[in-house]
Structure formats: C-alpha cells, structure tokens
Image: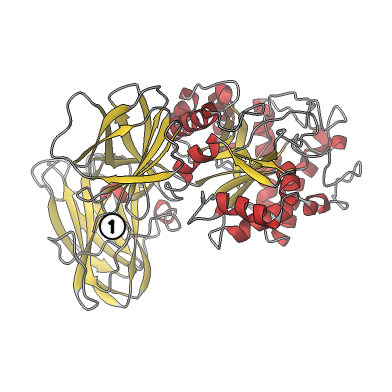
Amino acid sequence: MTGICSRRNTRPAAWLLGAFAPLVWLSLASAESRTGDARDDAEVTIVLSGYTAELAGPPIRHERERLTHWHSAESVAAWTVWVDRPCKLEVQVEMAAQAPFAGSPYVVSVGDASFNGAMQDTGAWDRFSVISLGSAEVPAGEHVVRLQPSELANGVFGNIRSVRLTGKGLRPGHNVKPDTSGPIKVITTAQLRGSRLRECDSLSPLTEAAPNSTTIAVNTSESFQTIEGFGGAFTESAGIVFAQLSPARQEELLRAYFDGETGHGYTLCRTHINSCDFSVGNYSYDEVEGDVDLEHFSIDHDRERLIPLIKAAQRASRGRGFKLLASPWSPPAWMKTNGEMTGGGKLKPEYRDAWARYYCRYIEEYAREGIEIWGLTVQNEPAAVQRWESCIYTAEEERDFVRDFLGPALHSADLANIRLIVWDHNRDLLFDRAKTVYDDPEAAQYVWGAGFHWYVSDEHHHAQMLTDFYPDKKLLFTEGCFEGTEDVGDWTAGERYARSVINDLNSGASGWIDWNLLLNMGGGPNHVGNYCSAPIMADVESDRLLYNSSYYYLGHFSRFIRPGARRVLSANTGRELLSTAFRNEDGSVVVVVLNEQEFPVRYTLAMDGLLTQTLSPERSITTLVIPAGG
C-alpha cells in the first residue's frame, strides 16, 4: 500500500541528517539513461544511489551500490536535491526483499511531502524491483530526501539500491559515479625527477590488467568517514615571522597555503589558547590571581601578531574560509598546583569552573574579532610534563572536567555547537584515554571526538580500534612536525608526513592538521628552545621563503580531497606502495599513492570497472583524479 501525506517525517534520527546530507543534483535525460544534458523544460530522473547516501542512526552497511543490514527503524539514509522551480515529482524506490522478511513499511520524505511504502517480495535479496510510491508538488529550492523504515518485519528490512525522482527543473550535480571511460589527471612530486605537484600526461583506461604489476583496487560503493579538512597551526611564532616578511612574501605565503586555486586550499587549522612553546614567553589572558569572574580577561596580546595572521589567512581564502580548532597548553599559573604555566602541574579543583568559563570567554572574544572558533581540545598533551606550557590530567580527571564543568559551561554560554575534542596527545594511549570518556554517557554527550599527535608512536591500530568501537565519534589528527630543523630538500620529512596522513585517514581520521605554518630558519622563535621545522621556512634576512618536501606532500591531499569527501574502500596487492582513496562531493574520485622505495613501481588501478596502469617514480607521491561522470 502506498500513499502521500503532507506532514514532515519527524523521527529524530532523520532530522540529524538535515544539515549534513550531500547536496546532489544528478540530472538524467530519462530513467534509462545516465548521461546527457536535459533541456530546461525536459522531464528528468535523478537516481540517488545507495552508495552516496549520508547515514544516521544505528549502522547501515554499504555493500556494492546497495544499503543493507538495516538493524533498526531508527536508521536513516538521506540525500539532498535541488529543484530550480516548482514541479511535480514522482518518487520510486529500487528495492529487494525476500519472504518471510518482506513487508517492512517505510517512509520516503522529500521536503514536506512524505510517501509511504512497504518492502515487496522480489524473490531474492539481489533481485531488485523499482516500485512507484506516487507523486507530489514540491516548491523550488533545496530538499532533503530521507528514507527510513517504520518497523522491521521479523527483524529484517531489506536492501535499497536507490531512490529515484522524476520531474522538471532538476539540476545536475555531484551524486554521480566517476567517469571511468575518460582520461585521468595525474599529479606527481618526485625527489629525483624535479617534479613538485606537477600535472603529468593523463592516463587512459585499459581493456585488461597488466601482468605482474601491483594492483590498487578501489571500491567506491563502500564509504567511510567524511573529511573536515587539512591545514596547519597559527602560532605566535608564525605570526612574528610573518610580520618580518615583505608584503610580497606575505602574499606568497598566504597564497601557498590558503588560495584554493593556486595553493593548498587549507580548510582546517589550529591555534593556541594562552601561550605555547612557540610563543615569545609565558602569557595568559588573565594574570590577576583569584579573578574567578574573569573581570580582567583580555586577548590584547594575541592582537599583536597572532590575530593579524589569522585575519590575513581569512582574506586569502577568498570567502572559502577555514575551520579553526583551539587548544590550551596551560591555564594561567595562578590556577595551577605548581604555580607555573610550565613544568606540568595540575588544574586546582577550586578553579575548574572558572577555567571552563575561560574557554567560553575566549571563543566570545575571538568572535568579536570576526574569528569563529569551530572546535576545542580540552588540553594539549595532557599526559606530558614539559619544560614549556603544560598541564596534567588523568583520563578520569579529563572525563570529570568535561562532564561536570566544560561541557555544561559551553551549553550555558550557548556554545553547544563547538566541537569538543578529548586527548589531543599521542597515538599510543588514544584508545584507552578516549574510552574512559566515551564510556561515561554524561561526559560523552558533550564530546565530538578525539584528537591525536604522531610523536612517540606510529601505531595506527589504536586509531582504527577507536573507529571500530565508537563509530559515532570522530577522529582528528591535531599535531605533527619534523622535530629539529631539517635541511631544505630533505625528502624524509615529506615521506613521513604522507605516511602518517595515509595511515591516519585509512584508520578513520576526518582531518589532518600540521603544526606551525611558518618558522624562521632556526626553527623558531621558541621561548624554550624546542625548535622544529615547518613546511615553509622563512629566511627573513634575505626575505625568501623556502619550501620543504613536507609542503609538497601535504598538497597532494589538501588540494584534491576537499571537505565533504568520503573515504572509499581501497587496498593494495603488494607492500611497495601506500594508498588512500576518496570520493568528493562533485563525484570525482581521488587516489593518493606513496612510493618510498628506491625504485619505481608499476601498478594497475582497478576501480568500478576501470583499469589503467602507470608508473610510480622512486621516492614519490602521486595523486590520481578520476573525474565525475555525466
């Protein structure tokens, strides 16, 4: 039985997808044709494939193009479509079910219109039928399309391959398969061949796989986490060096990192609350001891060098903007047990409430400067006693502070939209530390996810475990740098960056943030001598910018894997190469391939019926871009 009603589907899980469902406009000439441009007055069909759906609620499995293993009536699949003008839309569902499990009712909603249907017995789980649910008038504009079971027959729902909408005024867009019949763009950086993010000759498809070659297999029908972005950190040191450059060199640096057309197009960055080691000395925003009401709170210190750099980057991003994560290295000295911002120490219990409100005040003051804070980490490296700014929390102390003070303070200040991130330290204890917080529902409700650094350990399985055990929480790489000052041209730094990015992304990370954006040739300034390298170093005496290999390697990710991209399944047959693959919102697929060997490696890329072969140069990184289909 099918029907149409005008009330909006109000199930809570469905509404979670309203802001996040991908905006997709696959325009088709007819229900049978998947290519071709439609005339403005032509009736077109859009096919919303299961593999591009945004999912919420209890897990649903992507299996090839279908959505399967629905275990709950709270599970939701969603897409977004755009209608140029008011039109009558016909709704169809491509589904499969098998007795005695057929019969589960479901609702498909398009904006305010809802269509009721039931899973029909198609005779087999892989025998799909297209079922018409009816039609309704919809206004022009953006509409979220949701599919949700009403209940499960015998505990089973069935398989969904697509939702199909037919009408006039539907616009083409990103929810399309990659075009596996056309040329593939190839961008390479190689140590010995002089290539630096150089676009090479494009590749063409093959009819059969080449013998005796490594194969990188990509399956775009199985997708994982969504990307928030890539970027680096604004520190006071970076701001100081930036101010020492000429206007021309400043503009060069900003374009290199933030221009989305000619540079890296950074979209996710980090900064520090109070001072860090990459500052000229200890400072906080309230140096008046006992000022629990924060009457003397001021960010004037940041207005000298740090905020001007952030604002310059905002202008250079040309309206695209970037998300900004903020981390404290230490509370003010008077709030700590050791009376110093450096050397560890702990937050005094009597100042937990004031310190929680301190974060809120920081966010509000930065907002007055036109700088929106996207997220917070509770504490930078909470398990490390450092000679620079640091503060120690046990796992239980961090949990309790989030649950009883910081989470409630953010909500009371109308800042519940701030993404709160725990741990923000090395991979080795990532799972254990996050688990302590996540297993407390009262604390976990405030937490967006966990952050981690690369120091001490390359054990990526800790990140994978956290992804597997807590799939509703996010992962973010929040800091890494090449310690000490590398020689410009040292290739191992770039390779270490790429190795980390690929493994972190493949383990579930939704973004990757480098440490300092800019330092001088000595790896500073740093008020405790903890010098390190940055992707771009400045020779302020000669007014030159010097680009390390890490700059070029990071560009192979940030320039091509854009916010909103979803990681897709990929695997290699050999051990010579590392790779990761993503599908962008425009339908293009990006495959990044790292070769750390001293010899070139020939490999075959196999993806959705595509076969193509190329050579990965020795000591190189390559990005392959497969364009969106029609």
Q: Foreground residue, 342 or 136?
A: 342
Q: Foreground residue, 388 or 258?
A: 258
Q: List x then y, in percent, for residue 240.
A: 76, 46
Check the image and report above or below for 295 versus 499: below
Q: List x then y, in percent, for residue 179.
A: 24, 51
Q: List x then y, in percent, for residue 603.
A: 27, 30
Check the image and report above or below for 13 versus 403: below
Check the image and report above or below for 304 versus 537: below
Q: List x then y, in percent, for residue 296.
A: 88, 51
Q: Foreground residue, 295 or 173?
A: 173
In the picture, measured across the screen, residue 115 lies left or right of residue 595, that is left
The answer to whether residue 25 is visible is: yes
Q: Quadrant of residue 480?
A: top right
* Label 1 sits on residue: 107
Residue furthest to the left in view is 123
Image quadrant for the N terminus?
Answer: bottom left
In the picture, measured across the screen, residue 20 lies left or right of residue 131, that is right
Residue furthest to the right in view is 289
| Residue depicted at x 69% and y 53% | 309
The amino acid type, in three-letter code, at marker 1 is Val
Image quadrant for the C terminus?
Answer: bottom left
